Structures are given as structure tokens and as C-alpha cells.
Image (spheres, coloured by chain):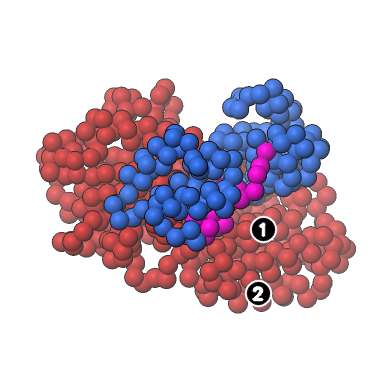
């Protein structure tokens, strides 16, 4: 069900923990499976649990508890705008409204072309660079509407990691 | 003034995250000294106690004392954990230590592991911190390659394995026992204490856990002595501390200054307020600490005792500055949303109470406030405080109660006029 590369990565994570503590690798294994499959369908969670030799319920519990797991399909670029207090004080609401306008969707939605999912999230720990957002693995800080526009343009042109 | 001299001392160096650069600036020299001379483990704990270093993650527990709680002569593995689940709104210092000086953190953990007899450890980094995760993992690989981690470190009888454990999005995992549950591959729900981690921690084994900044302070404390560190600050408030200054200042940033530095000097370092603005309020230690009125802060110094006297707590040193353009109701509504979102759901007063606080704040902010709402907020707060397993709920009550106490008239205006008293800025 998962790619060879994903299985290798999961094996590497598994090796970090004691022999009898396979469940410790569950957070990592779910993340790797999600990166491989796009989101965590029930079959994917079942498969991860099987790989680690644990009950599927353990995988469901973790996948529903932590905010970074997606149980439904998301766009190619998941845009997470921080809305916690330090970002709020520096205008994160305006950045979020601008993104809604530019993408033509509301928070929580995905664009019809499947390119972008827009979310508002709680503190991402980059308060010095407020307002900020995360797209994929990368943080974008000290946002202005112009900078958001150029980031969106670069992502639309096919980049995955744009400056 | 002595600025950025301990955990941020290498931040300006090119490639400061690389082993070669760290070693060129005396890095791992303390570890070599400790292991090769060798220094007795008890001697290290004595120096740590002398230094006055208190946990930099927010609770401020004396580090040397915590280290002394680790039992001796137990069977099985003892663990040493690093809490890098930085998530308290306003806090962003550990991210910089990990990005710019990961080896200082690793050396601090190695010295700690040697002092406490820990055989294995994990650095728990929040999952969103992909860049710091990659940097710390690369630093760990360099350290293994150089014989600084693994079996028989530097040819001695001391062995220690260290890995990164990535979080997956949950503020509560910054609570130490929730973090241990999370490393065990479970939901991050805090454990009831006692037993404390020193007797029953990760996998039920003796465990010590410290914050990134705490560990990164260790190499210099051991090389220069506990007294040296203590005297950088003031009694009971030893050393330096990173303050992350955010919000309405012209140069938001991490400033590592001696404990006891006047707030007004810190504010000036951060570029001061914007032109024509007045200081309204400050949250001195992250959103879980009570708000302090601007004029009180201007007469306060930045240390545990002084901030406590001002009615708040130093927390993680996350200084959130608010000028007179903010609407307090809207700001606190936003803070309340955080705690509602992050409650793990285990204790009823928190699971239900955080939602109550946010919903009442939300209706006041949106012109549907009722006359009895302020009393309701205070009542709900009083029924939550002290009735939960961990400190999250108390942290969620603090901003609501403290802001009503300081800015009651602003709340009343909102309720009576269905709109905001402040008409400019973010509010």
C-alpha cells in the first residue's frame, strides 16, 4: 500500500525506539503514510497499525487527536495561517481575508482545481515573524498582501518550495 | 549591557549550526573536560544548583534540584528528554536555538545525561518545525559521526543515544507527561502526578525532562561555574534569559539579557512602540500568564520575583506587547479560542470550561453580550482553576480574568453599546 521509500523511512523511525515499543513510531509512521498517500484513509491507518503490530484503534486515536493529520483529501498546497495573538496583533486577520479573496474560497475549503487548501491554525511558534503562515513544510514570515500574492503566483507556477 | 551571551552567543556566526563551527568556538570542550578528567556527576549537579538556573520552559523549577531527583542504582534505562514542543503563543526562542546552535543543546543534554546516568534520550520537536527538525537531525548525525553520541563516547565508559521525536500538532504535548505519552505513540494527554517523571517517566522508567534553552545554558555553566551564571542575574533569578518580544514593537526579536533587566530597557531594545502609540498592557510570559497594565510593566524588572510581584509570571519569557490600538475584548477572545482548541479533553472543567469562556467572550465581542456576562466569566473561571490534571486550563483562565480586572470598563462598554471602545488598529 505504501511506497518502498515510505516503508524505509518508517523502518528508520522504528529503530529509534526500544524493541518492545513499536507504538512509539506511530506518530512518525502516520506522517510518512500521509505524505505518501496524500491523506489518511481508514485503510491507510489500518495498514500502518498492521505494520507496527498494534491495534487499529491506536492509529485512529492518534490520527484524530493531532492537528497535522488529514483524514480527508486536501489540496496540493495546504496553507496554514497563524491566527494566535502575536500574529493577530500584527494583522493576521487581514492576511487571511486577503487569501480568501485571492483564492476564492473560505477558511477550511479547497480550491476547485485542487491546488490550495486554506486553514487558520493556532500558534506556529514563529511569533517574531508575525504575521506568518506555513505552506507544506515551509514557514513564510513577515507577510504583507503583496508578499502573499507573489507566494501564490510562484506556487501556481508549479513551485513547491518558493521564496 | 550583556546581550545574547549564553544560548544565543553563536547566532551571528556563519554556519553556526555545523559541528566544525561549534567546535571552533570551544564547543564540546566542556563535555571533553567532564568525561576525560573526569568530573564527578555529583559535582555537575552541585554546579547546576549553584547557578540558580530555573527551567526555561515556563514553570521555572530549579534545574539542579530536578536533576538531583533522578534515582541512582535503578535497573533498566534512565531517560533524558528535551522539550522542544514550543507552542505557547508568543514563544519562539527554542526555534532559534535549534536553528542556530543545535550542538549547544546536544552538548547540554550529554552533560546532563552523564550527570544523571541516563542512557537514552529524545528531543521532542513540534511537528510544524520542519526546518529546525532537519537541522537538529543533521547535527545529531554529525555528533554520532564524531563519536560524541552512541557507545563509549570519546572512548570512555559513557554511552548515550539521542534521537528526534516529531510531534504532530498539539500544544498540550508541551506538558511533560503528555509529551511522554506522545513519545509512547499515544494521544498527548497529561498523566496524573504523582508519580513524578523522576520515578515513573517515559516507558515507566526514571526520566528527566528540560526545555531547550535550559539545556543550552548547561555547557557554559559547567565550564565557567555556577557562581558565574548566578551573578549574571540576581539571587533566586540566576543567569540570563531569552525574551521573545512580539506584538506592537518596532523590532520584534529574541533578546537574551540578564535576569533583572528593566522592562523599559527590553522594550527599547525591541525598537520601542510605534510612533504616537501608548503602552496599554503586556503579557510577560506567554498567554498563560496574567496580563499586566502598561504603566506597571514600565516600573518592573524582568525576573521571576519581580514579575510575580507585578501579579503575573515570567513563564517562557514570551513578552507580548499591546499598545492603545488594541481592543482588549477582541484580543482576549482570540486568546480564549486558543485554549478551547488546545484542550486535550481529558478533564471536564477544561474541556467544557475553555469552550464556555470563548463563547461568552465571542458574544460580547459580537454585540450580544449580557449584563451578567462578566460575572459569568469570573464564576466559570473560578470553577476551573485548580480542578484539572495539568496547568492548561489555569493558563486559559488567566488572560480572561486578568483582563477583566484591568479593563473592566472596556468590557462594559462593549456590552452596553454593542461595539468597541477602541476604534483603531487590530481590534
- Mark 1 / mark 2, whichever is N-terminal: 1
Chain where mark 1 sits: B
Tell whether position B332 is magenta: no
Residue B286 image offset from top left, x and y in percent: 55, 53
Tell me the mark number nearer the camera, choosing from 1 and 2.
1
Chain where mark 2 sits: B
Q: Which residue lies at the image location 56% right of the left edge and 67% below the top edge? A: B345
Of A128 and B233, nearer the camera is A128
Number of marks in the image?
2
The residue where tag 2 is placed is B380
In the image, the segment drawn in magenta is A59-75
Residue B293 image offset from top left, x and y in percent: 64, 57
Q: Quadrant of residue B365?
A: bottom right
Of B323 and A53, nearer the camera is A53
Q: Is residue B131 left or right of residue B267?
A: left
Residue B184 image offset from top left, x and y in percent: 39, 57
Q: Are marks 1 and 2 in contact (CB under 8 Å)?
A: no
Q: Which chain is red?
A: B
Tell whether position A69 is magenta: yes
Q: Which residue lies at the image location 22% right of the left edge and 63% below the top edge? A: B71
Q: Is residue B332 left or right of residue B102?
A: right
Furthest residue in direction right, as rendered: B417
Whether residue B244 is visible here, answered yes or no, is no
Q: Is residue B207 above or below residue B223?
A: below
Q: Which residue lies at the image location 49% right of the left edge and 56% below the top edge? A: A59
Q: Residues within 10 Å of mark 1 (few under 14, many from 20)?
A: many
The residue where tag 1 is placed is B337
Q: Is residue B307 above or below residue B140?
A: below
Whether residue A73 is visible here, answered yes or no, is yes
Amino acid at each position: 500500500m505504501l511506497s518502498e521509500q515510505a516503508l524505509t523511512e518508517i523502518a528508520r523511525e522504528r529503530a529509534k525506539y526500544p524493541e518492545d515499543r513499536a507504538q512509539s513510531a506511530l506518530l512518525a509512521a502516520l506522517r510518512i503514510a500521509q505524505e505518501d498517500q496524500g491523506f489518511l484513509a481508514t485503510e491507510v491507518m489500518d495498514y500502518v497499525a498492521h505494520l507496527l503490530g498494534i491495534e487499529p484503534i491506536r492509529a485512529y486515536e492518534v490520527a484524530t487527536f493531532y492537528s497535522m493529520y488529514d483524514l480527508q483529501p486536501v489540496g496540493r498546497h495546504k496553507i496554514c495561517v497563524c491566527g494566535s495573538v502575536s500574529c493577530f496583533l500584527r494583522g493576521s486577520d487581514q492576511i487571511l481575508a486577503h487569501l480568501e479573496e485571492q483564492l476564492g474560497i473560505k477558511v477550511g475549503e479547497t480550491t476547485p482545481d485542487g491546488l490550495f487548501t486554506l486553514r487558520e491554525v493556532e500558534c506556529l511558534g514563529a511569533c517574531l515573524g508575525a504575521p506568518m503562515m506555513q505552506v507544506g513544510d515551509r514557514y513564510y514570515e513577515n507577510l504583507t498582501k503583496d508578499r502573499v500574492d507573489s507566494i501564490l503566483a510562484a506556487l501556481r507556477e508549479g513551485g513547491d518550495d518558493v521564496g | 549591557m550583556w546581550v545574547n551571551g549564553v544560548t544565543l552567543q553563536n547566532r551571528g556566526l556563519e554556519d553556526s549550526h555545523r559541528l566544525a563551527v561549534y567546535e571552533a568556538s570551544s564547543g564540546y570542550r566542556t563535555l571533553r573536560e567532564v568525561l576525560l578528567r573526569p568530573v564527578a556527576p555529583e559535582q555537575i549537579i552541585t554546579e547546576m544548583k549553584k547557578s540558580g538556573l530555573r527551567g526555561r520552559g515556563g514553570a521555572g523549577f530549579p534545574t539542579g534540584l530536578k536533576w538531583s531527583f533522578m534515582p541512582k542504582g535503578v535497573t533498566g534505562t534512565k531517560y533524558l528528554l528535551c522539550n522542544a514542543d514550543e507552542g505557547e503563543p508568543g514563544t519562539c526562542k527554542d526555534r532559534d536555538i535549534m536553528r542556530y546552535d543545535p550542538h549547544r543543546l546536544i552538548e547540554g543534554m550529554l552533560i546532563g545525561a552523564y550527570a544523571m546516568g541516563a542512557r537514552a534520550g529524545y528531543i521532542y520537536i513540534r511537528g510544524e518545525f520542519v526546518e529546525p527538525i532537519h537541522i537538529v537531525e543533521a547535527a545529531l548525525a554529525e555528533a554520532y559521526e564524531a563519536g560524541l553520541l552512541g557507545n563509549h563516547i570519546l572512548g570512555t565508559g559513557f554511552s548515550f543515544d539521542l534521537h528526534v521525536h516529531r510531534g504532530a500538532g498539539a500544544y498540550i504535548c508541551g506538558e511533560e507527561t503528555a509529551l511522554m505519552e506522545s513519545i509512547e505513540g499515544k494521544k498527548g494527554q497529561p498523566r496524573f502526578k504523582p508519580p513524578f517523571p523522576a520515578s515513573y517517566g517515559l516507558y515507566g522508567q526514571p526520566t528527566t525532562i528540560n526545555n531547550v534553552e535550559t539545556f543550552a545554558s548547561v555547557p557554559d555553566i559547567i565550564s565557567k561555574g555556577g557562581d558565574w551564571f548566578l551573578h549574571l542575574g540576581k539571587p533566586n533569578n540566576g543567569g540570563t534569559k531569552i525574551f521573545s518580544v512580539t506584538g506592537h514593537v518596532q523590532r520584534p526579536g529574541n533578546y537574551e539579557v540578564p535576569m533583572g533587566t528593566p522592562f523599559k530597557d527590553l522594550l527599547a531594545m525591541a525598537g520601542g512602540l510605534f510612533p504616537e502609540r501608548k503602552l496599554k498592557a503586556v503579557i510577560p510570559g506567554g498567554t498563560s500568564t496574567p496580563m499586566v497594565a502598561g504603566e506597571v510593566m514600565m516600573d518592573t524588572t524582568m525576573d521571576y520575583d519581580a514579575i510575580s510581584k507585578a501579579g503575573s509570571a515570567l513563564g517562557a519569557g514570551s513578552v507580548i506587547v499591546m499598545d492603545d490600538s488594541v481592543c482588549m475584548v477582541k484580543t482576549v477572545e482570540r486568546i480564549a479560542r486558543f485554549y478551547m482548541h488546545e484542550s486535550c479533553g481529558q478533564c471536564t472543567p477544561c474541556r467544557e470550561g475553555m469552550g464556555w469562556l470563548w463563547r461568552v467572550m465571542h458574544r460580547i465581542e459580537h454585540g450580544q453580550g449580557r449584563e451578567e456576562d462578566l460575572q459569568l466569566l469570573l464564576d466559570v473561571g473560578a470553577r476551573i482553576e485548580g480542578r484539572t490534571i495539568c496547568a492548561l486550563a489555569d493558563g486559559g483562565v488567566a488572560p480572561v480574568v486578568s483582563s477583566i480586572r484591568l479593563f473592566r470598563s472596556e468590557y462594559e462598554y462593549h456590552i452596553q453599546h454593542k461595539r468597541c471602545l477602541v476604534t483603531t488598529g487590530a481590534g
